[in-house]
């Protein structure tokens, strides 16, 4: 019945996300939120410990497409930084440091995933 299997890399990412969320809730939370944060922290550690890592076989084509995708992600993030600098010059005070950092963090990871997916779908590109 259980046909859905999660790879080791996804387990590691899920465990790290649970650990981060649990640490934030346990640190800032009071009462029920603190208990929920501690539970998330424990679940994250359990998921991280149970993630089976083995030898991952990567051929040259996969490595080349990954390198190309992440290079494009870096380049697009540098372009976004240039756009944000222009936005700060023309509209001062419209963007906070927290907004810029959160936008860059999300954009870099999302563009890396998107470019990786694109190059996996179109290997001739």
Image (cartoon, rainbow, N blue to C red):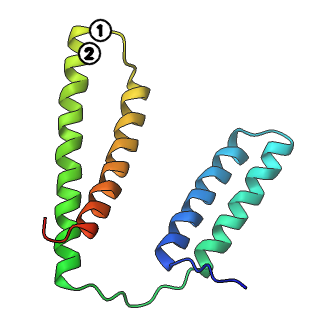
Q: Give residue 70's mark.
A: none
What distance separates the C-alpha of mark 1 from that of mark 2? 5 Å
Q: Give residue 92's mark.
A: 1
Q: Secondary structure at mark 2?
A: helix
Residue 34 x, y percent position in the rendering: 79, 46
Location of mark 2 (residue): 88
In this orientation, which residue lies closer to the viewer: 83 or 36? Answer: 83
Q: Does 38 appear above or below 27?
A: below
Q: Is residue 47 left or right of residue 103?
A: right
Quarter holding the C terminus is: bottom left
Crowd around label 2: few <14 · some 14–19 · many ≥20 (10 Å): some
Crowd around label 1: few <14 · some 14–19 · many ≥20 (10 Å): few
Q: Does 20 appear above or below 63?
A: above
Q: Residue at x 24, y 41 (%)?
A: 77
Query: Pointers 1 and 2 in contact (CB under 8 A)?
Result: yes
Q: Residue at x 44, y 90 (%)?
A: 54
Toward which corner of the image does residue 67 lie, by quadrant? Answer: bottom left
Q: Residue at x 54, y 85 (%)?
A: 52
């Amino acid at each position: 019945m259980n046909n859905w299997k999660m790879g080791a890399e996804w387990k590691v990412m899920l465990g790290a996300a649970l650990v981060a969320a649990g640490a934030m809730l346990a640190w800032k939370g009071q009462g029920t939120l603190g208990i929920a944060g501690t539970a998330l922290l424990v679940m994250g550690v359990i998921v991280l410990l149970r993630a089976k890592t083995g030898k991952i076989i990567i051929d040259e084509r996969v490595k080349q497409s990954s390198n190309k995708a992440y290079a494009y992600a870096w380049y697009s993030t540098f372009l976004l930084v240039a756009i944000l600098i222009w936005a700060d010059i023309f509209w001062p005070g419209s963007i906070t440091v927290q907004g810029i950092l959160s936008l860059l963090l999300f954009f870099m990871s999302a563009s890396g995933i998107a470019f990786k997916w694109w190059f996996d779908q179109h290997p001739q590109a």
